[in-house]
Amino acid sequence: MHALKIYWDPIKSIDLGFFELHFYSLMWIIAFILGFQITKRIWKNENQSNESLDSLFIYSVLGIMIGARLGHVIFYQPELFGEDFFSIFLPFKFKGGFEFTGFQGLASHGAAIGMIISMYLFNKKVLKKSILWILDRVVIATALGAVFVRIGNFINSEIIGKYTNSDFGVVFRQLGETEPRHPAQLYEAFCYIFVFITLLYFYWKTNKSKQEGFLFGLFLVFLWTIRFFVEFVKEAQVDERAEWALNTGQWLSIPFMLIGLYFMFVYKPKNKIA
C-alpha cells in the first residue's frame, strides 16, 4: 500500500534567460507582499499614515532577512565567519570558487530577533508609539509569512523530517532518497495558518489588541510551541550544537515561549497608550 507515499522531485527554479527565478525566493516575495497588504488594512484601521507604513515595510524586510541569516550562521554555521565571511551577507559563495547561491540558510529564531530589533528602531525613528503596539500588529502578517517560507523550504527539499519507517511520508528524490520522511515543513506551514487565523480573529473580533503585548505574546507562544514539537520529527540542521535531551532548535524555542507567556499574562504597561 503506497497511497500515502509521495515522491517529491519539483523544479526549483525557472530560467528566464536574463534571470533565474528560484521558487524559494518567490515564496519570500509572496510572504512580504501579502504581509504588506494585511498590515495596510490594519494601519488604515489604526488611522496611521501611508508614509509610516512604507517605512515599516523597509525596516521589516531588512530586519527579518538580516536577522534570519545571522541567526543561522551564529547558531548553526559559525565557521562561516572565518571561512567565507562575505557569503553571510551576500547571495554568493566565495570559498572553493565564486558561485551564486541565493540567500540560503535562514533561521526563524534569528528572524524573530531581527524583527524585534528592527521594530524597536522603527518606533524610535518613525512611529514613536510603543514597540509592543507595533509588534502586536506586525506579528499577524509575520505568521502568514512563515507559512510561505516553510512551503519554500518544502520546494527546496530542505529542513526535512526524519524517516517515518512506514509507507506514509514524502520521498525527497532530489536528495537521492528512496524512503519516505515526515514532511516537517508542511506540518509547520499548516500549523502557522492556524496561528495566523487565530491572531486575525483576536485583532478584529475582540478587544485583545488593546491589551498591549497580548497578541505579540500569543504569537510567540503558538509559533514556538509548534516549532518545539515539530523538531521531534525534524532532521538535524547542519551540525547541531545541542544534543542533550533536546536539539538546538528546541532549546532556542523555550525562551521565546516563556517571553510570550509573560506578555500574555504578566506584563502590565507602565503608560497606557491611547
Image (cartoon, rainbow, N blue to C red):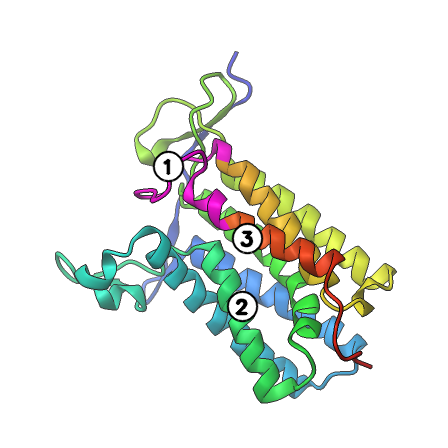
Give coordinates of residue 85: x percent, y percent. 23, 66
Q: Which mark is residue 255?
A: 3
- By secondary structure, the bulk of the magenta-drawn segment is best described as loop
Q: Residue furthest top?
A: 1
* Sequence order check, earlier mark of 3 and 2: 2
Q: CA distance from mark 1 to mark 2?
A: 28 Å
Q: Residue at x 58, y 75 (%)?
A: 119
SS for tag 1?
Answer: loop
Crowd rating for badge 1 (residues with CA inside 10 Å; few <14, some 14–19, many 20+): few
Give coordinates of residue 173: x percent, y percent. 36, 32
Part of the protein shown in magenta: 232-252
Q: Amino acid at mark 2?
A: Met
Q: Is residue 104 visible?
A: no
Give the residue number, with chain letter if any, for mark 2.
Answer: 115
Give the residue number, with chain letter if any, for mark 1.
Answer: 243
* Sequence order check, earlier mark of 1 and 2: 2
Q: Residue at x 62, y 42 (%)?
A: 190
Q: Is residue 176 magenta?
A: no
Q: Amino acid at mark 1?
A: Glu
Crowd rating for badge 2 (residues with CA inside 10 Å; few <14, some 14–19, many 20+): many
* Sequence order check, earlier mark of 3 and 1: 1
SS for tag 2?
Answer: helix
Q: Amino acid at mark 3?
A: Pro
Q: CA distance from mark 3 to mark 1?
A: 18 Å
